[in-house]
Image (cartoon, grey):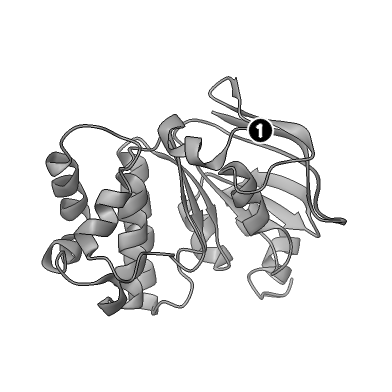
Amino acid sequence: MLEVHDVVVRYGSIEALHGISFEIQQGEIVTLLGANGAGKSTTLRMLSGLRAPVSGSVTFEGRDITQVKAHEFAAMGISHVPEGRRIFPVMTVQENLEMGAFARKGSLSDDLEEIYATFPILKDRRKQLGSNLSGGEQQMLAIGRALMSKPRLLLLDEPSMGLAPMIIDQIFSIISHIRENGTTIFVVEQNAAQALRLADRGYVMENGRIVFGESAEDLLKDPRVRAVYLGESEED
C-alpha cells in the first residue's frame, strides 16, 4: 500500500530524516518505535504532506505522492491524527466530526452514526465543545474526525499520550477494531509494549534513521528492544 524509499527531510539546514526506507502492506497495523527526537513525528508529517522530502520517493497505492500538497491527502485516502489531538476546542463534538469530512460530498448522517457506534461517548457529548471533553474523549474525537474522511491509511501519532491506563486499553481496542473494518494503520507510540502487542510489524528509528524492522512478535523478543524500549534487562 505504501512504500517509502530513501527519503530525506530537512528543517532548514538540519537533516531530520536521513534516507529512510520502509513499507506498509494493505490491512496491516505497523508501528514505528523510537526515543523522543528520533524523527517519528517528522515521518508522519512527511507522510501527510506537512513536510515535503528534499529527496527520495513516497508511493501510495502505486501513485507517487512525494510532492503532493497536504490538503490533497484526505481525498486520496490518508488521514493523520497528530500528537496532542489538535481538535477544534471552540467547536462542538459534531462540528469537529463534520470538519473531518471536508473533502467529501453528500449526506454525513450515516457516517456520523457509524462514528457514534464506535465511540458511544461522543454521541452523548455531541453538543458539547471540544474543550470540555476529557483527554480520552478528545483522543476519541480526534480519531473519529480522521475516520470521517473514510481513509484507507490512518496515521496515528502517540494516541496514548497523557491518558490513564484504563483509557489507553480502550483506545488500543478501538484501533484494533478500526483495522478489522478494513483500514490500514501506521502508529507512532511511546508505549512500545502496547504498540507491539497491537501491531503486525514494527520499525525502530534512531537519530532519523530506520535501524531495523521485523515482525512485532520478533521485536518483542529482541534483546535490544526489550532493553531500550521495554525497560527489561537480558536477565529479565
Which residue is at the front of the view, 29 or 231?
29
Q: Check disc 1 and report the residue beneath it.
A: 67
Q: Quadrant of the C terminus?
A: bottom right
Q: Residues within 10 Å of mark 1 (few under 14, many from 20)?
A: some
Residue 205: image location, x then y, percent: 73, 55
Residue 122: image location, x then y, percent: 19, 63
Q: From where the camera sits, is residue 225 visible?
A: yes
Q: How many marks?
A: 1
> Taking 170 as reference, is 132 above or below it?
below
> Taking 149 as reference, is 232 above or below it?
below
Residue 204: image location, x then y, percent: 70, 54
Q: Which of the 4 image quadrants contains residue 4?
A: top right
Q: Residue at point 46% right, 78% down?
A: 162
Which element carries disc 1, helix, strand or loop?
Answer: loop
Q: Is residue 180 toward the left or the right of residue 82 in the image? A: left
Q: Which of the 4 image quadrants contains residue 30?
A: top right
Which residue is at the front of the view, 23 or 100?
100
Q: Is residue 57 toward the left or the right of residue 177 in the image? A: right
Q: From where the camera sits, is residue 218 visible?
A: no
Q: Residue at point 87% right, 56% down?
A: 13
Q: Which of the 4 image quadrants contains residue 159?
A: bottom left
Which residue is at the front of the view, 90 or 222?
90
Q: Quadrant of the N terminus?
A: top right
Residue positioned most to the top: 62
Which amino acid type corresponds to the residue marked 1 in the rendered image?
Gln
Residue 3: image location, x then y, percent: 64, 31
Residue positioned most to the front: 90
Q: Residue at point 58% right, 64% down?
A: 192
Q: Residue at point 65% right, 53% down?
A: 219
> Taking 110 as reference, is 222 above or below it?
below
Q: Is residue 152 toward the left or the right of residue 4 in the image? A: left
